[in-house]
Image: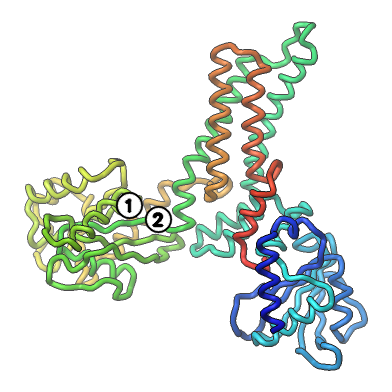
Amino acid sequence: MTHLILELTNLYQTKNNMTNYQNNDTICAVSTPNGSGAIAVIRLSGSKSLEIIDTVFVRTSKELHHATCNFGTLYDGQDIVDEVVVSYFQSPRSYTGEDVIEISCHGSRYIQQKIMELLIKKGARYALPGEFTFRAFRHGKLDLAQSEAVADLIVSESKKAHDIAVSQLKGSYSSSIKTLRSKLIDILSLFELELDFGEEDVEFAKRDEMRQLLDDIESELSKMIKSFELGNSIKTGITVTIIGKPNVGKSTLLNLLLNEEKAIVSEIPGTTRDVIEDVINIDGFLFRFIDTAGLHETSDVIETIGIERTIERINQAEIILHVIDLENAEQSALTSEIQEFRNHLKNKDKKWILIGNKIDKVSEKPEWIKSVFGDEMIVISAKKHQNIELINSKLRDYVLERQISDRSVVTNSRHFDAMVKARESIQSAQQAFAANISNELISVDIRQALYHLGSIIGEVTTEDVLETIFGKFCIGK
């Protein structure tokens, strides 16, 4: 019954997030994943953390000191709950900026529940999703972009996603935003000075210099906006669609790349009727592989749906692996096939990698392929596992060729939207400069750009934005 009350309380609090996010209660939560394990960690944060732990923890030393661990026993009245290790981080030298207690206990779900019930009985309340990180933001330990990097770090599944999240958490990304805002503030302050001395006809801001500065800011914003496609892909997985005629070995190749029997392999054409996908990590980069139905004429209703989905996935992909059957390849047929696939593309600039499969069935690469495609085509045998490493190398090179600094890569859609709006305001100011419009009106656009950039790092924000951001965090972080 007590556990049910706790769950209902948590649901009620989640529905009333911002009221509770903004208060100063002492909060608690299990910070390790749900389930049983060797140990679990339970956190307390707030002004009553020491007072609460002192009422339930009998330890070997008399006092808790900052950044130290103490072994002892948790009691509920006369009953032993568990032998635990308690760590103490004193305000403001803690993650949240408040007094923080971390209790390392045995991982039994029953023990975790009993400790949570005990802490709540002594005056704490159940933390909301992301509330510990929200308090770090509120107390100036992290800005908003750094707070979101915490969530990205927790869910990072590749080395590159991890590196970007760490860089953003350290503040390098926020520093880039702050630099842009500082330049805009400099322009705005000069405009304001001119307004203050308007009657004296004093020009503090040389328009040519201001225009050049806006051009530089717009250029830097455009680079960051352009980085979002790659940054978001690194975060969620770069999409690689495998296409080709039926029975050329697409499913065999997918299974080989994933190192598992994900797709059904058969000599019967049209076996793959729906889209099959999975994610793998290649040298620290996350790739999302998609096997599709072969693109061909068919009267089968289900196959037709699969082909429609193939066309959809071709346009969603960043990289296309086009597989052909070397054993039965003919130059005119292959040329027509490539053109047929390309006709379905909305973006003709996609990375297109030709893969000649079944090299084990022929003595060597056909001469006409050498003359038409040169070294652009990778020849493999999916069945014999030959040259598969060449595909991985091509995929890795694709990412490395597009690499940009972790300092300025954009991985967050909220940041991307804010930057697009900021750039629109900058472009409006540039047009106003070109039309020789007064600085007073131009400053309106610059203020708008400042607002949008400020929303990224939390210089300006609303309760709704904060609730949306921190509500997506796991409880206990």
Horizontal and vertical percent for residue 407?
Answer: 58, 47
> What is the quadrant of residue 75 in the picture?
bottom right
Q: Relative to residue 184, is residue 277 depicted above or below?
A: below
Count neighbours of disc 2 (C-alpha within 10 A) and say few if under 14, some if 14 to 19, many if 20 or more: many
Which amino acid does the dot numbered 2 rest on? Ile
What's the CA distance linking mark 2 and mark 1? 8 Å
Q: Relative to residue 379, is residue 60 depicted above or below?
A: below
Question: Residue visible at 23% across and 45% down?
Answer: 344
Circles 2 and 1, Cβ within 8 Å, touching? The answer is yes
Question: Residue visible at 71% across and 72% down?
Answer: 29
The numbered mark at residue 287 is none
Q: Mark 1 highlights which residue?
A: 319
Front residue of 307 and 400 = 307
Count neighbours of disc 1 (C-alpha within 10 A) and say few if under 14, some if 14 to 19, many if 20 or more: many
Residue 170 in view in this figure: no
Residue 330 in view in this figure: yes
Does residue 98 appear left or right of residue 246 in this picture?
right
Q: How is the image coloured?
A: rainbow
Horizontal and vertical percent for residue 41?
Answer: 70, 77
Q: Mark 2 highlights which residue?
A: 238
Horizontal and vertical percent for residue 45?
Answer: 79, 67
Front residue of 354 and 291 = 291
Which amino acid does the dot numbered 1 rest on? Ile
